[in-house]
Every structure is written in structure tokens, then in C-alpha cells.
Amino acid sequence: MNIEQKISLAAAGAVEKLYGVADTALVQIAKTRKEFTGDYTLVVFPLLKASRKSPDATANEIGEYLVAHNPEIEGFNVIKGFLNISLRPSFWAARFGEIADDPDFGRGAPTGRTVMVEYSSPNTNKPLHLGHIRNNLLGWSVAEILRECGNDVLKANLVNDRGIHICKSMLAWQLFGNGETPESSGMKGDHLVGKYYVRFNDELKKDESLLEQAQEMLRKWEAHDPEIYALWERMNGWVYDGFEATYQRLGVDFDRMYYESQTYLLGKALVEDGLAKGVFYRRDDGSVWCDLTADGLDEKLLLRSDGTSVYMTQDLGTAYRRFEDEQLDGLIYVVGNEQNYHFQVLKLLLARLGYTSWSDAIYHLSYGMVELPEGKMKSREGTVVDADDLVEGMVETAREMSQELGKLDGLSADESAAIAETVGLGALKYFILKVDPRKTMLFDPRESIDFNGNTGPFIQYTHARICSVLRKGRNADGGGNDHSDTDYAKVGAPESYLPEELEIIKLLSDYPAVVQAAGQSYSPALVASYAYDLAKLYNSYYHDHSILREEDSAVRAFRLRLSEQVAGVIKKAMRLLGITVPERM
């Protein structure tokens, strides 16, 4: 139970005792706004019918009861019907002690729920690009946050390894490749295959018959033609190797791998089942459809007239396999908002087939697109920002900026390279994840690498600064900061807390609630914002107050312990974003 919930229960108890009303829904507690004095605020207007008094009179009556019956509450003030409640420093000292002594601080209790998060879901006809980076980072972070909230989480990747787009790359390589391979070209496999996807679209402008040839290749693939199938396996193998290298660089992993080539047949079987049940129908040309006009949509194609499947076919099969095999309580698809219609249809089709509980358990995390200053990316025209090139560029920029600012001074070449990798990737991940997932974002690499402001490097540098303070503190005065055998040294003397120290402890206390809120809203941006606020607050405190030069050894010990907890929570929060925080910079 977090602090806000405890105050809510106390307030609900006061309302019941004073007015005989036991409706907790009437008790609305929130953190007090910064411009007012207090820690938590009770809105009394919903209680006026029960109290039959004015807003101020009601607030004062509840405030007096809370102070009299709750020793952790120090006082209150009333402003226009809002009751602002202040907690004692001794309460915050006890809370700080709990935080410092809990290695699992921030982790939720087990929920018993199994949730699958699907992300990445690349096509094997091109390399990953900037849009995929947002998808991968968002999906991985959401999965880690849900796991931290106490869920059993499975990270899943559905590889779209079949279909007309794959055949376009295959046909172009077959016609124009002259046997080129990753080894002979020196290119990553996914880059090589992507080259021929662009080549197909270029050649199509000259020869429209290429599309018919690609469609014929798809029919042969579904008929398991040996030559076409062997070519498909070879080129997909190149792509898988390329994808894996990119995933490792990004720090992204998966618990389950699914392939469209292995699920589309199950999807076809489900379509046949739907035909038998009368929920789907076959047109004269042999194609299979579902009429969704009664649901405000249109008619959806499920099988083409030549019997080949579409995306929806394999998604039905994949969803069926996942729910059957894993007994999922939730399935989250991390897919861009251009696919909103697709997932509306998927849920409706599952419900029509009789799998209502599965349909209800599906959630589409519909995120906004990533745009560049010069406009949208177009993979067919080869104008995308390649993921590998972007990561390499971020790391190189981080190295140059760190070197200019003297943050690599005294480090070995290996240490400097590690810092550049950590800062470059941290900048990229933070810049993307700090944006609300549902918003379209404009990506500007130059803005992301800055050691000041709301950036990953600023938070990373704050953590490194704290680690430096802690190292020096351990060695200062022959270890004079070591008072861990007394409660005083662990939490400090509450009456001596500086206002800034109380603010830090309060913000530390918010961390579990932030993680839970991020899990409920599927928004790593909440964690990113929290990490920045904590780093910013600590930096201000560090600038204004001495830690290592504090003469009172017990106060110094408390400030070091407070610094240690700030570093620990920053590290936990950034880990949920997939960001490493260095101890030296």
C-alpha cells in the first residue's frame, strides 16, 4: 500500500466517524500542488452532502480529526474547500529507512497474471529502421515495467517472413543479384535483402509484369515449390543474422519467437472453421470474407481468390496458438497507429469465432509514428533512417561530445569506448521513451545527446556524479561516514532534515506508484519523467549543500546514504528503460 492509499484510508475513516458515511468513492486524495503547503490534498466538495456544512468548515473538521487520530499527520491547512495535509518529518524518516532497507523497492507483489507483449514484428525484406527502434524500445520497456509490477511476462516477436513483400526481394535478387551474398558484398544480410526490395520497386516502374511474377512466386511458395522454398530459406537466413546483430546492439531480447510461415496454415484452418459456422462467407471468385458492417467497419478479406492468405489470416492463427499454449491473461500488441483498424478487426473476428475471452484480453498499444525534420520515411524508396547507421552515429556523437567536455579524461581506450556506447544508446533510448507512446514524435539526434536538460546523458552523468561522491565518502576521514550500526546514521535525525532532503525522500517514496502507473498505462514516459525529476532535484541539492565537507559525521553519513538511495532508484528506473547508468564518466 502506497502513502496516498494510506492517507485515503485515514480520510475515509474520518469521514465515516464524523458523518456516518462509508463511501470511499467520495474520498479524493492527490498530491498537493507545489505552490501550496502540504503533502496530500483532500477534495471536500463531494463530502458536503454528508457533512451539511460549508467547504471550509468540513475541511477543518476532517483535518482536526486526522491530526488527533493519526500520529504521522503533523498539521493541515484549508484553501477554498481543499484540505492540504502535512506529514511529520519522523514519518518521512521512517519511510526513508524502509526504502533504504528494501532491495526490492519499487517491485510490485505477484499478480498471478501472465501477459505477453509482442513487439518488433519485422518483415524479412528489409533492415530495421528508426520506426522499428521506437517499436523495439517501447515494447521491451513495457514488458520490463509490467514484470516489475508483479506480472509474469513473455516477450514475443512475430517475424513476418512470408508474403508478397518477401517475394519481391526474392524475385529482384533472382533477376538482378548475380549471386551476391553478404559475404561477397560485405553487407549485413538484412541490408542486402533490403537493397533488392528497393531494386524491385525501381524496376517495377519499368516493367509492370514483375508484380505478376512476384505473385506467381508467392503461389509457388505456398505450394512448397522446392526451388522457391530453398531461395526463401537462404535469404531469410541472411536477414535473421542481421536482425540478431541489431537486437544485441539495442539490448533487446525475446522469450518467444513466432514466424508467419508457421502460423498462417493454422489461420487458414480457423477461416475454414468460420466458414463452417457461417460467420465468414465465400464469394464467387473463391475469396473468403467477413462482413463487419454491423460493427461499423467494412467487409474484411481473409483468403484471396487463389487461396493465399493475408496478414489477418496469420494473426488469427498466431493469437490462437499463443492463448492455447501459454494460457495468457493478456496479450499486448505494440504496433503503430496506422494498424488501428487491423486490431479492431482481429478482436471482432476472434469474438465471432467464439473466442470472446481472448478477444477481450487483447490490447493494441497504438503508438505514434517517428518523423524526421525533413518528413516521413519511405522504405520502398530507400529513404528510411537505418537502425544500424543511427546507432553507430549516436555512439560516435557521444564519443565526440564526451571528449570535448572532458568526461573521458583519464580513461583508457576501452573505457572511453564503453562510455561512448553507454551514453550514445542511453541518449537514443531516453529521447524516444520520454515521449508519450501515443504521440507522433519528431526525432532529432542532436537534441538527444546533451549533458544538460531532459536527456539520458544528464541522468547518466548525475548517477556517475553520485557514485563519485560515494567513492570519496567511503575513503574520507578513514571511513568516518560509517555509522551503519545506529538508526540515526541510517535515516538521520528527522528534526534536522533540510527541506530539500525531505523533498528528495518524498520523491523517492513515489517510485513504486510511478512504476504501477506506467504499467497500467503502458507508458515508459512516466518512468523517464520521474528519473529526470529525481536527477534534477538531487543536482540542485548537491549544488546548494555540502556532502563530503559536512563537519558533523552523522549528518554526513545520512547525506551519503540519501545519495546512495537516489543513485539506486535512478539505476532501477533507467533499467526499466533499457538504459545503463555508468559509475564513472
Image: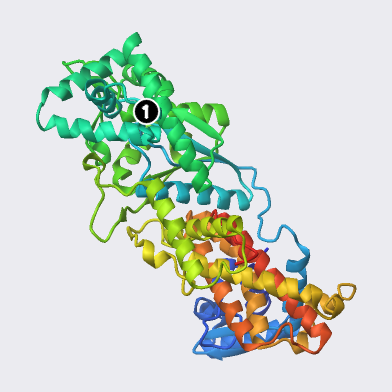
Asked if residue 500 is positioned above or below residue 536 in the image, the reply reads below
Q: Is residue 529 visible?
A: no
Q: Residue at x 35, y 40 (%)?
A: 343
Query: Residue 289: which quarter of the image?
Result: top left
Q: In the rendering, at what x and y percent does residue 137 appear?
A: 47, 50
Q: Residue at x 34, y 18 (%)?
A: 231
Q: Is residue 397 visible?
A: yes
Q: Residues within 10 Å of mark 1 (few under 14, many from 20)?
A: few
By what rule are the colours in the image chosen? rainbow
Q: Amino acid at mark 1?
A: Ser
The residue singled out by tag 1 in the image is 184
**In front: 301, or 384?**
384
Q: In the rendering, at what x and y percent does residue 237 appear?
A: 43, 25
**In front: 309, or 405?**
405
- The N terminus - image quarter: bottom right
Asked if residue 513 is positioned above or below residue 229 in the image, the reply reads below
Q: In the rendering, at what x and y percent does residue 350 appear?
A: 39, 31
Query: Residue 66: which quarter of the image?
Result: bottom right
Q: Is residue 159 left or right of residue 311?
A: right
Asked if residue 274 is positioned above or below residue 294 in the image, the reply reads above
Q: Residue at x 28, y 58 (%)?
A: 372
- The C terminus - image quarter: bottom right
Q: In the rendering, at what x and y percent does residue 9 appear?
A: 66, 70
Q: Is residue 344 left or right of residue 482?
A: left
Q: Residue at x 41, y 62 (%)?
A: 435
Q: Is residue 582 left or right of residue 271?
A: right
**In front: 118, or 548?**
548
Report helix, strand or loop for mark 1: helix
